[in-house]
Amino acid sequence: MKHARIAYAGAVHHVTEGDPRLHSGNPVVWLPPVQPGTIFALGLNYADHAKELAFKPPDEPLVFMKGPQSLCGHLGQTRRPPGVAYMHYECELAVVISKTARKIARANAYEYVAGYTVANDYAVRDYLENYYRPNFRAKSRDFATPLGPWLVDAADVPDPMNLRLRTLVNGRVTQEGNTRDMLFNIPALIEYLSGFMTLQAGDIILTGTPEGLAGVQVGDEVITEIEGVGSLKNTIIGEPEEQAPEERKNVG
Amino acid sequence: MPPECGNAVYGVALNFRADLEKLSEPPRAPVLYLRPRNTWNVSGAAIRLPADAKQLKMAGTLGVVIGSGYVVVNDVSIPHESYYRPAIKQRCRDGFCVVGSQVTDRIPGEIRTSINGELRCRASIGDMVRPIDRLIADISEFLTLQPGDILLIGEPPDAPFAHVGDRVRVEIDGLAAIENEVVPEIAPI
C-alpha cells in the first residue's frame, strides 16, 4: 500500500493511493509522508558518484544528518539562494525505520524497515566547507529536501536493492542509476547505524545518489523518481524579490 | 527542560577562540552537528562508555532553548581530532546529551565542569567566536530554529575526559546542576 500525508480541507489527513480526496478537485497539499525522527543521509554511497566528485570511495559509510526543517513534500518549492554558482539535485531512495533497532545484524535488517519513499537531497556546493563536511549550510537548508509523495510499504518493494532511479529537469532525463550500485546497501547501513546508536520508528535514511548531477536554476521543475516507489516533483524558486518585482513596487 | 519530540538539538563545534588557532582557516558559517533524540539524557541517569572507547569528553556547555531561555548541558562525545567529516559515530551514542531540567532567562557568564568533585573546566561565554545573537542570526539564515529547539553554543577547548566510575557535574549559576556517572556499556539499553 502507498500512504501519504496531505493537508486537505483545513486539516492533516492520512490517505492511501486512490483516496477520493486526492481526486476531488479540492486543493491538496502534499506533506512529507512521514513525521521524521532522526534523518540520516549518505555521502558518496555510489561508486560512480564518488568518482564523479573525485573522491575515493569511503571505507565506512559517510553519514551526515539533517534537521527536521529540511523536509518538504511533493509539489513543494525549494529556494535557490541568490548569487550561488552550483546547486544540484540528488535522487535518493529513502528508507523509513519501523521499530526500535539496536545492534541489528544485516541478515535481520529488513525486519526494521517500514517502507520506502523518494528523496531529493539538494546541495548548494558554494557553501560546502571542510568542517563536518557535508555541512548543514550546504545540506540541511529549510525545505531543501523534498520527500514523498508516498511511503510505500516494505512488503510492496520486494527487491529494494534493484530499483532504477532517475532525475528529470524540465522533462529531460539528467540522472540515471540503480540502487544495486550502492556501496553500502540497506542492510549494511542498518547494521552500521544500529551498531552504535538506537534507531527508532520514523527515523529516515537517505541512501545516497548515483552519478549524473546537474545544476538547477530558478523556475526549473525537478522530478526525482524511483521504480515502484514514486515520482517526486519540486520547483526551484528564487528570492521573493526576484519573483515579483512589480508587486513589490506597488506596495505602499 | 528536556527537548520535546519533534524538536531538534543542534550543537556548534569550533566556537571558542582557542579552537581557531588549530585551524588553517576559520569556518565561514557555524559548524553544526545534530544531537538526535537517542542521545537525549537527564541528570542522574547513566552515561555509558561504549565498548569501543577508552574515555569520553565532557563538554559542559550552555543550551539556548529557542523561545524559552538557557539550560545547562553536558555534551558528551568520544574524543576525536579530525573535524573533516561529521562525527556521527563519536557523538550520536545513546544518552550522550544530558540536558538540565531548569531554564533561566539570564545569560550566564560561565559554565563549570567538575569530575569527582574537582573543578576541571571553567568556560566563559566571552570566549566564544560567535556570541549567541550572532549564532542565531547566522544559523537562521538557512535553517529555521523552532520554539523548543536547543542550540548548544560550543564545546570548551579544555573540556575534560572522564572514565568509568567518574561522576561528572556541570553547573551554571542560577540553575540546578546536572550530574551523571560514567558506567560501562552493557548489552541493549
Image (cartoon, helix red, strand yellow):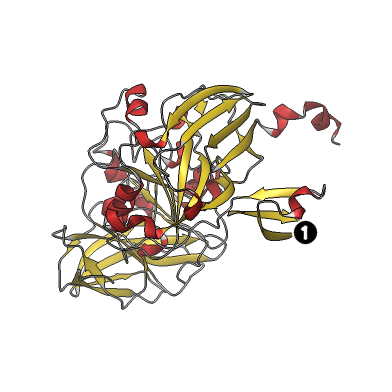
Q: In which quarter of the image is the C terminus of chain A?
A: top right
| x then y, percent, for residue B62 | 39, 61
Whether residue A75 sits left or right of residue B45 in the image: it is right
| x then y, percent, for residue A9 | 79, 57
| x then y, percent, for residue B30 | 42, 42
| x then y, percent, for residue B94 | 31, 64
Q: Which residue occupies the foreground of this view, B150 or A26?
A: A26
Q: In which quarter of the image is the N terminus of chain A?
A: bottom right
User: Where does label 1 land, which residue?
Assistant: A10
Q: Which residue occupies the foreground of this view, B180 or A11?
A: A11
Q: Mark 1 lies on which chain?
A: A
Establish if A188 lies above or below A201: above
Can the viewer see residue B155 in this picture?
no
Q: Residue at x 46, y 42 (%)?
A: A93
Q: What residue type is labelled 1?
A: Gly
Can the viewer see residue B123 in this picture?
yes
